[in-house]
Image: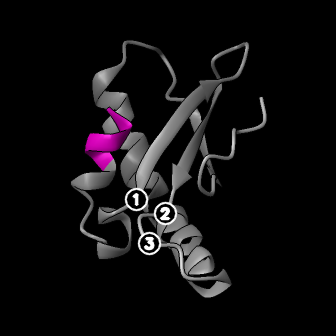
Amino acid sequence: MAALALGSSRDPRLNQSIVHSVQSSADGARLTVYVTPGDPEGLDSLASLMEALDAARPWLRRQIAEEIVRKRTPEVRFEVVLGAEEPDA
């Protein structure tokens, strides 16, 4: 679902990004979305990717709210994963 949502974003900085994984907190109140940049070119592109993800956060939460059956939509946070790096649990 998150990969589809990022791919359908209007921000071209997100079009090539790949969702590595999504982890839920124990209480389900938070989701951490681990994203791999499609074309990492140093710190400027990573900062730009984080800016795009932060701007897309409200839109992504609405997408999640449409897909799940819960009283409250989880908060969403993003972490960038580079290459074969494993996300911290």
Q: Quadrant of the C terminus?
A: top right
Q: Are marks 1 and 2 in contact (CB under 8 Å)?
A: yes
Percent of width and height locating residue 33: 56, 41
SS of the residue under disc 2 = loop
Q: Where 68 falls versus 75 (above or below)?
A: above
- The residue at the point 31 percent across, 72 percent down is 11
SS of the residue under disc 1 = loop
Q: Where 26 falls versus 19 (above or below)?
A: above
For the view shown, which residue lies furthest in the bottom direction? 44
Q: Are marks 2 and 3 in contact (CB under 8 Å)?
A: yes
Q: Amino acid at mark 3?
A: Asp
Q: Give left or right: position of 52 versus 69.
A: right
Percent of width and height locating residue 48: 54, 80
Distance in Å between CA atoms under marks 1 and 2? 5 Å
* Residue on which the image places disc 3: 39
- The residue at the point 28 percent across, 29 percent down is 66
For residue 17, the mark is 1
Magenta segment includes 86 = no
Q: Amino acid at mark 1?
A: Ser
Of labels 1 and 3, the one closer to you: 3
- The residue at the point 21 percent across, 54 percent down is 8
* Residue on which the image places disc 2: 37
The range drawn in magenta is 1-5
Decide: few, some or many residues near mark 1? Use Cα within 10 Å; few <14, some 14-19, many ≥20. Answer: some
For residue 65, the mark is none
Q: Where 35 falls versus 53 (above or below)?
A: above
